[in-house]
Image: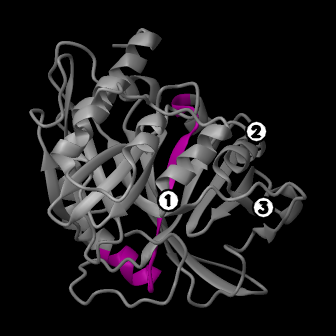
Amino acid sequence: MTATIPSPAPSETHDAFPINGTDYIEFWVGNAKQSAHYYRAAFGFELVGYRGPETGVRDRASYLLQQDKVRLVLTSPLSPDGVIAEHVRRHGDGVRDMAFWVEDARAAYAAAMERGATSVMEPTVVSDADGEVVLAAIGTYGDTIHSIVERRNYRGLFLPGFRATSSPYHPTSTGLKYVDHCVGNVELGKMNEWVGFYERVLGFTNILTFDDKTISTEYSALMSKVMSNGNGRIKFPINEPAQGKKKSQIEEYLDFYHGPGVQHIAIATDDIIGTVRELKARGVEFLSVPLTYYETVLDRVGKIDEDIAPLAELGILVDRDDEGYLLQIFTKPVQDRPTLFYEIIQRKGAKSFGAGNFKALFEAIEREQDARGNL
């Protein structure tokens, strides 16, 4: 499981690249102030920090949002020039950084570079009255990066440059707990290249593989490999398109994002029925599956704790593996470009990713593609 706020826990001794958890996920967006309001109102995040001209940062404005162990940073450029503005122009709103929390950023960066990583930022010390943070960064697929964050000598809110902030507007939590996994889409023929990157550079292992026979419909298909770090706290499925009669969801993403990037973020909850009810009440839109799905789902997955009626009402999917079952549901894209979306997941022992739901899910995605004229 992926923890997104540091808590004392030793790294596993067998970890080739020790990572304590996801430190934060940063989005580069066109209007961070308005995006922050959306995530607060719709998803129940709390605004806890700000960085911008008022804190001495001249080229960008960033809003730090938090819900339980999930930390999001929403950043916008303050001029039409520069790398952030170019990223937004090319990709639209999207994930720039999936940051790792480590004990020793210098050692982690050096190990990554020795194994063939591309440097984005050499280890740099940033400090304020609350101590210091060591930051470094390496590149991954597309324009996405992994920052490497060492904060053992820091007592402040988040990072130097951010100040605590609050608002009289306090939407209640929707029950989101932590980042379960993040999924990347890459070009045809590139999946194994990036699988190799995570194996070689970061010591991840391939824990699951789905081929185009597993993930396919009448019209399209994709292939996916799930990468996990040594202690299992970071999981990155990587998708590539496969040959099909029509354009796959991966191809649509690549067309509109103009390259590879993060397709969806899965966030865990302990009460998916309550969470999804609340998200729907706040305007979050979800993919829907035919009610016929629920006529046979229990024959496939067996006994579950939940009543099937609210699952059918809300469109929540169910799947089982050898260790238990899971419940999951997927939002529609959360921006006008059909790119990034979210998965809400509740695990009842299962450690898999819902392979039994792939056909129903991808048919639902294809219905949305068809409505956009992109199938």
Residue 70 within the magenta-colored segment of the rendering: no
Which type of secondary structure does the marked residue at label 1 adopt?
Answer: loop
Q: Could you tell which of marks 2 and 3 lies nearer the N-terminus?
A: 3
Can you say which quadrant of the picture contains the N terminus? bottom left
* Closest to the observer, 38 or 273: 273
User: On the image, numbered disc 3 is attached to which residue?
Assistant: 50
Residue at screen point 17% across, 17% down: 218
| 216 is higher (above) or lower (below) than 208 | above
| 213 is higher (above) or lower (below) than 176 | above
* Closest to the observer, 185 or 214: 214
Left or right of 150? Residue 288 is left
Q: Amino acid at mark 3?
A: Tyr
Q: Cα distance, mark 2 to mark 3?
A: 18 Å
In front: mark 2 or mark 1? 1
- CB contact under 8 Å: marks 2 and 3: no
- Corner quadrant of residue 133: bottom right
User: On the image, numbered disc 2 is attached to which residue?
Assistant: 79
Neighbor class of circle 3 (other Cα within 10 Å; few <14, some 14-19, many 20+) is many
* Closest to the observer, 192 or 347: 347
Q: Does residue 262 show up?
A: no
The location of residue 251, given as percent across then percent down, is 31, 25
Neighbor class of circle 2 (other Cα within 10 Å; few <14, some 14-19, many 20+) is few
In front: mark 3 or mark 1? 1
Q: Amino acid at mark 1?
A: Asp
User: On the image, numbered disc 1 is attached to which residue?
Assistant: 271
Residue stretch rendered in magenta on the structure: 90-111
Q: Cα distance, mark 2 to mark 1?
A: 42 Å
Q: Could you tell which of marks 2 and 1 lies nearer the N-terminus?
A: 2
